[in-house]
Image: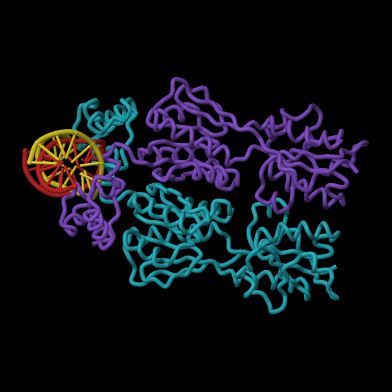
Chain colours: A purple, B cyan, C yellow, D red
Amino acid sequence: MAHPTLEDVAARAGVSRALVSLVMRGSPKVRPERREAVLRAAAELGYRPNMMARGLAAGRTGIVGALLADLHDPVYAAVHDGLADEAAGDVRLLVATGRGRPARELAALDHLLDLRPDGVVLAGPRIAAAEIERAAAGCAVTVIGRALRSPRVDCVTGDDRAAVDGAIAHLSSLGHHRIACLDVGARPSPLRRACPPGTVVTDPDALWSEPVPPTAVLALGDATGTTTLTALLRAGKRVPEDVSLVVHGSPPTARAAQVTTSAVPPADLGRLAMATLLARIKDGAPARARRRTVPPRLDERATTAPPG
Amino acid sequence: MAHPTLEDVAARAGVSRALVSLVMRGSPKVRPERREAVLRAAAELGYRPNMMARGLAAGRTGIVGALLADLHDPVYAAVHDGLADEAAGDVRLLVATGRGRPARELAALDHLLDLRPDGVVLAGPRIAAAEIERAAAGCAVTVIGRALRSPRVDCVTGDDRAAVDGAIAHLSSLGHHRIACLDVGARPSPLRRACPPGTVVTDPDALWSEPVPPTAVLALGDATGTTTLTALLRAGKRVPEDVSLVVHGSPPTARAAQVTTSAVPPADLGRLAMATLLARIKDGAPARARRRTVPPRLDERATTAPPG
DNA sequence: TTGAAAGCGCTAACAG
DNA sequence: CTGTTAGCGCTTTCAA
């Protein structure tokens, strides 16, 4: 039979449905021999509990949904790692994504919500705050990367400003005075505001046409980092002998390419978000929504050195 | 009320439960005025159908699960795009991942299966064929990137050999005779077998110590491509004036970095897999399991040219 | 068209 | 410890 039920297992094991139910949920008050008989019957039949029925009857599903803004952005893969790391064994972590588009994201959230998850983590949501609020009416919600001022939504954000400050401080301590902040890309990075005034440059090739070229570069974002490194090498610059490079971000290739980075580790965001969500699920809504900030980390690798 | 039910909506609209059910599923045989009244009541209450109850009662869930081998690999983001593109509006695409580890992947698959999805796509699965077979006993299954010889599992694979052949042919047609195939990385790429005998090199820096250095390089894989390009530039080579570069893979940065690539587009794999799965869900099991192969694509960009 | 009735597979009291 | 009894919210016949 394609999908044996609790009843089938009970019949085969010669016990009642309730007993099988207890065994399936790992209740301690079942005699070992009985338990074993039930487990054997279940295995022989290839039985697997029906989450639909279980969720309906129990009133909770044990499902936690993760709405990741964009699967193409490795940041969200790392966020997911953090979420999965922190999730206890009894949560079922399910992922959905809007592929970067608000309308699709909203649809994906609705699909997730239809499953009646115990909680939902929204990583970098692009949808309206009102929609998030609405979701929070039905289940526990934690948002990553956006600070809502809703009383029922917990928020976890990274301290990007501190990451930029840390990078600048690191370069300064090495002796760099002329530091350029590079931001290549269609839209200006919000990090620009965290950079020292007048240091932001948008074209890597324009760096060397200035009277006093910089001795160090801070690249805002993973993509900018890659572009910058390539441009530097193409221009015949040696890194870090001629110019030091720090990337704000955690590019997957950073470790391999030995690039110095300064950023909030996305996995930390995931871990803290999941911990916060589980706490809300377990203990109920706190008096005030939680606001947590994750500090950045500087990973000094091979692209920074004192100015030559 | 936190979760209004069908009955609540019916009471508010002054109709029966069955009518609300019909409206919710978009049945055409409801008088427009009634429909509108029901819809209004539902909106006012913030009603949303309970998938658990619906799935239980209907016997099918409209859920399609995607088990992606590794979220950190951009290939799977592209596969997901293909899956989502092809999925009709009435399927709910849910993602799970084993984060590269077989044991976790198996657990993730089980969680997915517990939801009683109508079908499941396994992208690059690391688990045993027997487990996949077992899953196929309960719902439609399509596997991407692995050819199983199971009679009930459809398989979609990319023609990687053709991708390598295409890259070599492209370089040959440009006039290159000394072509090196680079494979940097802990484990040897399976693509090596598709390369012409004696062309495989594992250290990018070793390229130039040979008596007759190559005029063109084929990098096997995204990571190798990035490493190779960096190594080339570091070594003072101009691309493509001194050496041409083709990468097998579709690195996200390829377009930006203007790298010529030859590979099976992962999104194509996703699209074909979803189409295959939906066909099986809709029409039932075919006489024989389907085996489909997706052809590669050559994207000529700025890193290939005739030898200088 | 609309309403009533019978479950889907499971959990959660409760009584033995 | 074990069996019985109600539903959970929805779809689906089947009558009206």
Q: Residue at x 81, y 57 (%)?
A: B233
The vertical placement of A245 against B306, above or below, is: above
Q: For this view, does B81 lie left or right of residue A38?
A: right
Residue furthest to the right: A211
The vertical placement of A207 against B229, above or below, is: above
Residue furthest to the front: A32
Q: For this view, does A295 lie left or right of residue B276?
A: right
Front residue of B163 and A35:
A35
Q: Quadrant of residue A114?
A: top left
Q: For this view, does D6 lie left or right of residue A151?
A: left
Give residue C15's position: percent from left, percent from top. 9, 36
Front residue of A28 and A97:
A28
Q: For this view, does A226 lie left or right of residue A72?
A: right
Give residue A109's position: percent from left, percent from top. 44, 38
Residue furthest to the bottom: B197
Front residue of B244 and B134:
B134
The count of marks equals 0
* Image quadrant in which the C terminus of chain B is located: bottom right
Q: Is residue B57 visible?
A: no
Q: Quadrant of residue A40?
A: bottom left
Give residue A283's position: percent from left, percent from top. 39, 29
* Image quadrant in which the N terminus of chain B is located: top left
Q: Is residue B194 visible?
A: yes
Give residue B66's position: percent from left, percent from top. 44, 53
Q: Quadrant of residue B267?
A: bottom right
